[in-house]
Each structure stands twice: as structure tokens, then as C-alpha cells.
Image: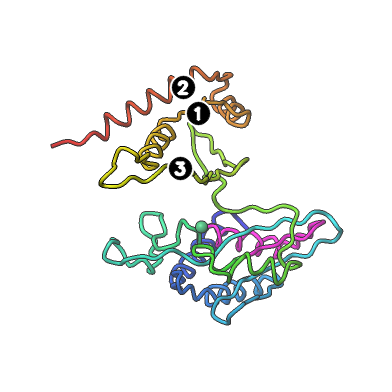
Amino acid sequence: MTAVSLRSETVDLLQRLIRIDTVNPPGNETAAAELLREYLEASGVECELYARVPERANLVARIRGTGDGPRLALLSHTDTVLADPAEWQLDPWSGELRDDEVWGRGALDMKGQVAASAVAIASLAREGFRPNGDLIFVAAADEEVGAGFGMHWLCDEHPEAARAEYAINEGGGDRVVFGDQAYYFCSTTEKMSAPFRLRVLGRSGHASMPGIADNALVKAATLIVRLGELRPEPRLEPEVAAFLHLLTGVAVFLPALIALNLLLEYHGRSRTAPRN
Ligand SMILES: [Zn+2]
């Protein structure tokens, strides 16, 4: 099978996935899961649908391993965020191919990857590929809202169906071309929030004795300003340094990076400055 026909197979599957409205809520991902099952079973890939409610199925497809090697899961989701057709140049559920690009809600997040992963496992099955450990493809429901119908539920209720030593998912990074070289980013850490509680004590006053008040809000304001002004010391993490080294061919040092960042920020600001 040539790369060109795999590409058109992926485009065709992506178009058909986009034409199924899986805006979450309500999701209705079963229609997408059934389309994928029909497509995959035609290539001999075994599939199973797991659903907490009939209209919100998760699909798990698998090429069984011949040994007990590590399992690799290609993870994806079939639901999308909403789309207001008034804000679109094309019908968001048209799946139209225009100028070599497929248009539609979910084309990027993430039916494109759903289609690519499905075609990958289907074409491997057709070629008779037998891995040592299972190759698994999961097209889960309910990623965008996370109301308990998707991956979380699947792991809780059917852990054996989803269990894998390795997984490839969206969000790690894009395919980026520098010069004439394509790079595939991967995520080495996950950004987290740091919620915390500020407890500031004071004493209330009285209209007749305002002088006795010790206003906690005023003290909190100072603390919040200090938090807002906090600028942590920049650090060059080893993964970033290695990536930049790979990209530029030279070792990169933090002061030079900070200077470059400031320059880009300045450049970005001057380019996006409002004009009248
Ligand atoms: Zn996504």
C-alpha cells in the first residue's frame, strides 16, 4: 500500500468522521464508534464497544500480540467542542476538502488523529503485522467535558480493555517543520496549576470607632500584588536544551535564550500593536 493511498484513505475516513456531529454535550459518539468499527473490522481488526449509556460508546480495537511484550495504545477521542455555523466560512460538519485541507469541527481536535490512528492499525492488520505485545487503538467518548462516559469510565469499569504500558495521545506536540526537516514534538512533563488558600486575619471596626479596625482585605491586597509580581528564576530544562541543540546544532545557554525571548516578545508586541 503506497503512502498516497494511505493518505487518501485517511482523508476519506476523516471526512466521514467530521460529518457525524459529536459535539459534546451531548456527544452522541456511538455513531462515530460504529463507523470506526465497520471500517476496522473490514481490515480484520477486532473491535469492542464499551458504553455507559448506549449513545456514548468508546471503541477499543486491537491487534493481539504474539508474546507478552509491552502494549502500545493509540489514544484518541471522538467528541468535539461546539461549533457555531455563523462563525464558520464552511459548514462545520461538511468535511469539505478545500485546497488540500479537510475542513470541519474536530478536524484538528482530534478526528484527524483518530482517522490517522485507525488507518495505521487497519493497514498494519492488512499487512499481517503481528506485534509481540498488543497494539491497541482507543477512540474514547467524552474527552471535552469529562462527565464520566469516556476514558475515565473505561479505565474504571473495563481496565483490561484499556491497559497498556505505553500510549500515544494528542497534546504532546505538533509536527513542526524547520528548514526542510520535520520534527515531531513529544511531551516530557505536564503543566499543572498550583491552587492555594490565603488566610488573612484582621479585626472589624465600627462606624463609631473606625480606628480599631485592622482590615484583612487590605493586607490580602498587598499579598496578591506580590504574587502577581513574582517572577520565578528562569531555568533551562535539559529536554529544552537538548531540543534546541538538535535544532540549531549549537549548545544553547540560558542568557542567550532569555535575550532571544525578550527580542521575540518585543518584536511580537510591536507587530501586534493596535493601529488606527
Ligand atoms: Zn482533544
Work out whether residue 89 or residue 217 is closer to the camera in this orientation and state it: 217
Magenta residue check for 134: yes
Q: Position of residue 114 (x, y in %)?
A: 56, 61
- Which element carries disc 2, helix, strand or loop? helix
Residue 102 vertical placement versus 259 (above, below): below
Q: Position of residue 118 (x, y in %)?
A: 61, 63
Q: Residues within 10 Å of mark 1 (few under 14, many from 20)?
A: few
Work out whether residue 216 or residue 271 is closer to the camera in this orientation and state it: 216
Query: Where are the magenta residues, as a range?
Result: 112-138
Q: Which residue is mark 1?
A: 232
| Residue 201: image tag | 3
- Seen as rendered, the residue at the extreme front is 208
Amino acid type at circle 1 is Pro
Q: Are marks 3 and 1 in contact (CB under 8 Å)?
A: no
Q: Earlier in the sequence, mark 2 or mark 1?
A: 1
Q: Which quadrant of the figure has residue 164? A: bottom right
Work out whether residue 151 or residue 106 is closer to the camera in this orientation and state it: 151
| Residue 258: image tag | 2
Q: Residues within 10 Å of mark 3 (few under 14, many from 20)?
A: few
Observer-side mark, 2 or 3, equals 3
Q: Residue at x 50, y 40 (%)?
A: 176
